[in-house]
Image (spheres, rainbow, N blue to C red):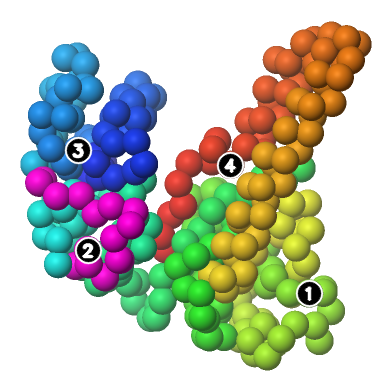
Amino acid sequence: MIRIAIDAMGGDFGPEPIIEGVIQALDQKSFLPILVGEREQIISFLPQYYLDKVEIVESSDVVSMSDQATQALKRKESSIYKAVELVRDGKADGVVSAGHSGATMTLATLRIGRLPHISKPALATIMPTISTKTLLLDVGAVTDCTAQNLYEFAIMGEVYAQKVLGLSTPRVGLLSNGEEDSKGNALTKEAFKLMKSVPGFKGNVEGSDIFNGTVDVVVCDGYTGNIVLKASEGVVSTVFDLMKTQIRKSIPAKIGAFMMKKKVFKKLKEKVDYAEYGGAPLL
């Protein structure tokens, strides 16, 4: 059975929503959650039925969102440190945290280690498209990348798309300011040369290609990727707010919205709402 170490104390709202998510996951999948945090708090939110379906590892400290990521290495009693150590020691197969992403990345990189021949980790996320989904990486792990980093991201993204997303021959694109081979800055031009050796590489892609399904994997530096991600989230929120504003202005619009609520709006929200796509894997 797969064992997942879960930082029960990480996140903006404490352990309650974390444990609610674990319960929902247990109802759908067979795995062993190892909840790391203050035992009394965890038990207070965990229904009696699920007590024998989880393990609890006590921790007395929490890395808050305002802490520096580098401080996490010294906070050995923190929930995220102990969760990462479970993987390092072979007692868990993976770790999940909704807490400080910088602390999680730092601990995972320095305590668990990187993949062989990979110099920097990458955060990946799923972006919605018209018909399928696009994997975008990096979205914040490495803001200042080298061409070699982007090349390695392309390899990791391609393998992730194959093994996790189930794509036999994923198409990989390099995010640039135009599709032509000559487009881009010094970084992307150098990365383009290296990425030619990646089997599924299709060349440069533009920002719009992230959402139209032209490729399955889009590679960029973490600075650019994070801006793309946050801008996309903002656009989705704004569009929904605009729709609500316009619907409230007339009775026919309200009636139409009511009739389309379940069949159209619900499916649209499931498709484009970033909250529906869960966390970002650290590759």
Q: Where is residue 63 in the image (x, y as percent from the top left)?
A: 24, 54
Q: Name the residue under label 1.
A: 177
Q: Residue flagged by tag 1: what amino acid is it?
A: Asn
Q: In which quarter of the image is the N terminus?
A: top left
Give the alpha-carbon distance from disc 4 to disc 1, as whole Å.
25 Å
* Image position of 163 (left or right of 136): left
Label located before the other in sequence (2 or 1): 2
Looking at the rendered structure, the kind of residue marked 4 is: Tyr
241 vs 156: above or below = above
Mark pair 4, 2: CA separation = 27 Å
Q: What element carries label 4?
A: helix
Residue, disc 3: 35
Residue 97 pos. (x, y %):
32, 47
Residue marked by disc 4: 274
Q: Where is mark 2, residue-wise?
A: 72
Task: Report the Cα–Cα distance between label 3 and label 4.
Answer: 25 Å
- In whole angstroms, how far apart are the C-alphas of marks 3 and 2? 18 Å
Q: Which residue is drawn at 84% across and 79% down?
A: 180
Q: Earlier in the sequence, mark 3 or mark 4?
A: 3
Q: Give the range drawn in magenta.
A: 59-73
Q: Nearer the viewer, residue 69 or 49?
A: 69
